[in-house]
Image (cartoon, grey):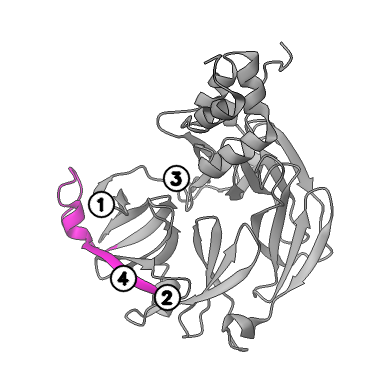
Amino acid sequence: MDAMNDDTLGLVLERVDSHVSLVRAAAVCRRWRRAVADAGFLRRYRSLHAPPAAGYYHNPTAPWGVDGKLGYSSVFVPSSPPIVGARHLSLDFLPGGAESWSVCDSRGSLLVLMDTRYNGQAFPDFAVCEPLTQRYDMIPPRPSSSIWAPLLLDGEADEVGSRISMSNFRLLCMNGVTLTSTSIFTAGSSWSEKNIDPMALGIGPDFRPPAILGRASGSWYFYIRDGSRTLIGLDGSTGVFSSSVLPAIENWDVHIQSFNCILTEGCDGNPRIVALFDGTMKVFSRLDSTEWALEKMIQLSEATCSLSGYPSSFVGHNISTIGVGFVILSQRVFGIAEQWPFSVNLETMEASPAANNVGQIAYQCELPWPPALHACLDR
């Protein structure tokens, strides 16, 4: 390897398939550490390899009759196989401890959290943090308290290809219950206002407050409940809104109203819409930037018939949790309070037993970029 010139060494290191292995390669010798620490190399490597997921956070649902704000803090579930021990991703370093906060969104290695003690009377306390490094920033309040949906957006790309970090993020909040006015907080700066023309997105003047349908591929999606089947996407990289139209084969307003329709990320990284109706689960994928189509469907009774201990007769299903490449459904039986949760893989459509009480959304958290090279580069 000593005979290899710097350009060839860079090409070899670019093919290291994981960030953890890259850090180990940097520990081999001083020359390799300098090659890995080079900003140009890090930028190229980041364009080829997405940071791995350290795991997922979720906000557990409190049991019936128990105050959900008391002792039900966000839980971290490490990826399999684990990259980092769960104790390193604890949120106990936040003011008041982990039990005082609920995860609202995640992007890259960052989380945005809201103080669970918020009473709706003033601007809520928001914090943006990086769990692995135990760094956090409290977000200054806005004059208005009528906000919802705090969403993390990328900042500007830096010299090593990172678009989001503790010094480089944006936080977008909706003003009121419409999509026509938003506020954006920029790290190291302050709040700014951004108004949106609803007509440019195909939204009529008399639409009802939108419903958050879910998020995928770094974007959030909102459904406009006016019969137009319009879906609004918010790109987490650019902060730009766009619109698409759902197929006319479903009564989407009814699905949304009955909470039997969600959007999540498929195994391929692209968005999927999951809808439940009469014991059938349908999965829709996006054809292009403006249209969606039915991709797969399955009878849930057939999917669960091979699961040991699950009832053969039921009165319906609820969508309880969404995550990358899967949904968790709860099967209900008439006259029985107990539910039987099971997970459905969105690629294979196979069902398997699942844990209960894991919250509505699994918030993915990645390892920070660039990786920390603790070894001295001059040795």
Q: Which residue is mark 2?
A: 291
* Residue type, label 2: Glu
Q: Residue at 62%, 82% (x, y): give it.
A: 200
The magenta-colored residue range is 291-316
Q: Is residue 203 magenta?
A: no
Disc 3 target residue: 358
Q: Residues within 10 Å of mark 1 (few under 14, many from 20)?
A: few
Frontmost of labels 2 and 3 is: 2
SS class, disc 3: loop
Query: How far apart, in angstroms, are the residues tagged by discs 3 and 4?
Result: 28 Å
Residue at (74%, 51%) from the top-left corner?
Answer: 125
| Residue type at the position of mark 4 | Leu
On the image, the x and y values in percent for residue 319 come to 38, 59
Query: Could you say whether the residue bearing mark 1 is in a helix, strand or loop?
Result: loop
Q: What residue occupies the far top of the structure in this picture?
A: 379
Task: Answer with left or right where residue 4 lies relative to residue 117.
Answer: left
Residue 367 is drawn in which quadrant?
Answer: top right
Residue 294's disc is 4
Q: Which residue is mark 1?
A: 348
Q: Earlier in the sequence, mark 3 or mark 4?
A: 4
Label 2 to label 3: alpha-carbon separation: 32 Å
